Image (cartoon, rainbow, N blue to C red):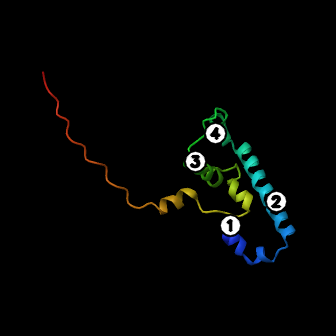
Amino acid sequence: MGRAKFDAHALTRCLPPKALEDWRTWARQQVYAFQRASSAVEGRNGALAPLHHNQRGLPKQRYKVWTVLHNFDCRAPDGTTPAARFFRRAFPDLFETVLSNVGALPRPRQRKRVVTLRH
């Protein structure tokens, strides 16, 4: 939800400032707890940690993709994803969702014939 939608929402407008700030604090704590708990348990940082410790980092787009893969496709032994456990609801299969949005792939380019010289 964008900031404008958040500020315009009926519930946001009717909450006293103190209650609104308490909710924001609670939400931040939940997000931080989810990031710490899921990353350590699921092992995603096992691949990312060396890059961050070496101060190299990841390209921002790749980091977003890895985050989505981790939260919506990594499964615990009981078959749940970190997102499903955090939000307490099921999400559609990530792979099927992506495939349903992929159109026809372009044909490979036609390579020019390589002429070889014989000695």
What's the residue at 71%, 52% (across, down)?
78
| Distance (Cα) linking label 1 and label 2 | 16 Å
**Front one among 64 and 7:** 7
Q: Amino acid at mark 3?
A: Lys
| Distance (Cα) linking label 2 and label 4 | 28 Å
| Tag nearer the camera, 1 or 3 | 1
- 107 vs 118: above or below: below
Circle 4 SS class: helix
Q: Residues within 10 Å of mark 3 (few under 14, many from 20)?
A: few
Q: Which residue is mark 4?
A: 48
- 91 vs 49: above or below: below
Q: Which residue is mark 1?
A: 3
What's the residue at 53%, 61% (across, down)?
97
What percent of the width, then of the height, locates residue 42? 70, 45
Q: Earlier in the sequence, mark 1 or mark 2?
A: 1
| Distance (Cα) linking label 1 and label 3 | 22 Å
Query: Would you say 47 lies left or right of 34 here?
Result: left
Image quadrant assignment for residue 91: bottom right
Q: Amino acid at mark 2?
A: Thr
Q: Are marks 2 and 4 in contact (CB under 8 Å)?
A: no
Q: Residues within 10 Å of mark 1 (few under 14, many from 20)?
A: few
| Distance (Cα) linking label 4 and label 3 | 13 Å
| Tag nearer the camera, 4 or 3 | 3
| Tag nearer the camera, 2 or 4 | 2
Picture disc at residue 60:
3
Q: Are marks 4 and 3 in contact (CB under 8 Å)?
A: no
